[in-house]
Amino acid sequence: MPLTAPDPERIPVVVASGQAIERDALVNPVDLMVRACESALADVPGLRHRIDRLSVVDIMTKVGPAPASELAARLGLGDDITLEVTTVGGNTPQWLVSRAASEIAAGNLSVSVIAGAEAIRSSRARRAQGMVRDEGVADLAPDPVVGDDKPGFGPAELAIDLLAPIHVYPLFENVLAARAGRDADAQRTVIGELLAPFTRVAASHRYAWFGQERTAVDIATSTPDNRIVCEPYTKRMAAFLGSDQAAALIVCSLAAARRAGVADRSVFVWSGAEAVDVRFVASRADPGRSPAIRAAGHALFASASTAAGRPIGIDDIDRMDIYSCFPSAVELACDALGLNGDDRRGLTVTGGLPYFGGPGNNYTTHGIATLTDLLRDGDGSDTRLGLATGLGWFSTKHALGIYGSTPPPRGFQRADTTAAQRAIDATAAEMVDSLDIRAPATVVAATVWRDNDGAPAGAPVVARLADGRQMAVSPADDEVVAAMGDTDMPGLIGGPVIVQAGAPRYRLAES
């Protein structure tokens, strides 16, 4: 039976995007969002006064209680639109697009603006110069908050100060290296080869923070200006949180785009999906896999189909942007989605967070903006598809979206991952905070972080007891830290440690 053409009022499209960057003047995030939004609105001027909702992605460099309200006022959008800010998470930009697309498909939304920014460079410069922090407009009522506000770490992680992404993602990396049978040096080489193509993309992107192309050796080799920050990562392997960048998207119905005379700019939102890995890192049975990306990806592709009714797959994607705060984030996604690290299509359209820049929770807005611009550049004679992924916390919250240069045959689909989510949640290991007596345990994941001089400064371990319960443990004393600094981390995975009685501490088995 032939498909019925969807009502244009219920076909969601990304009709415009804008990006902004500042390297010299001191700005705040709202300044940058104004630039990005004005850039997007300049391409679709007829939509400026038809906006129903303005969503602002959570800002790390906080400016006042109501950045969405402040942004709306500076854009002259009036008082009759819905304003909101999100919770923490690099997944939120894609989640916002999928939510807007769902509401457009249901007939409950017409035009939505999604914007975000960080001004970390400016914030640091103000502090270095002894200037007062830019607090924005302080007398506004707080904007409503939307999104998943559950914490990214639990009591076990908190007890050993396992809270920073630069200390957590290397845990995953060492598990991946151990699984592949590689030591730390060999894993750094593989990571360099994975990331070198990212630098080439960044070098050609006008809004990228770093314009320098680097070789795999440049990325993998430890030098004074590329020290190892947390085993096995060098500085050039980590997201760069020091930029002033902003991006904005305008998501609307195809009918709204037609009324504004800009329907020819439409990039169609085909499908969206979300899933959450076991929320607390120390509770994950296998930190070297992402069941949530696998589940969301499977549901995402299964919900979309070609005109012939065939479900699309990863091989049908023409361009993609895989979230890349750290190498393990890319590798976990590749494993879950059936991609190779050297995929000829490339894994990023921006250059990724280490080279394009990592503007807090808003990076994925840049990824979607760039992806949809690329899809928009074709002549419309064939269907070209793009994939965007975003994640929040510690590869915890995931959101994926498929975009197309032509309308989806079945209309926009929001994939259902409810059953898969229940199965993922059921895999969480039981946690124990402390032991009454010392006991042997098996290392599930481990890393060492180093100070500016290269000395080991910390060595968190996720350990599994004989009864299957898991613990997050830190070294018993400085002697253990020093010994861990001389230990090949991948080689330690699956090996023994001794968990001490009392506080969550460990010693190496031979100690």
Image: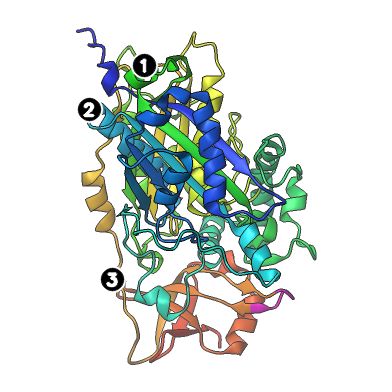
**45 and 2: which one is in front?**
45
Q: Quadrant of residue 467?
A: bottom left
Q: Residue 482 appears at what percent x and percent y?
A: 64, 83
What is the three-letter code of the residue carrying label 3?
Glu
Q: Give the residue at mark 2.
A: 107
* Residue identified by numbered label 1: 259
The disc, 2 or 1, on the residue closer to the chain's N-terminal end is 2
Observer-side mark, 3 or 1, equals: 1
Q: Residues within 10 Å of mark 2 (few under 14, many from 20)?
A: some
Number of the front mark, 2 or 1: 1
Q: Is the C terminus in the top left, top right, bottom left or bottom right quadrant?
A: bottom right
Q: Residue furthest right?
A: 224
| SS for dot 1 | helix
* Classed neighbour count for the residue bearing mark 3: other residues with Cα under 10 Å, few (<14), some (14–19), many (≥20): some
Q: Secondary structure at mark 2?
A: loop
Q: Is residue 159 above or below residue 272?
A: below
Residue that carries the numbered disc 3 in the rendered image: 430
Q: Where does the magenta region start and end?
A: 452-456
* Cα separation between marks 3 and 1: 56 Å
Q: Residue at horizontal 63%, vertical 69%?
A: 488
From the viewer's perspective, is residue 487 above or below residue 202?
below
In the structure shown, which secondary structural element does the residue marked by tag 3 occupy?
loop
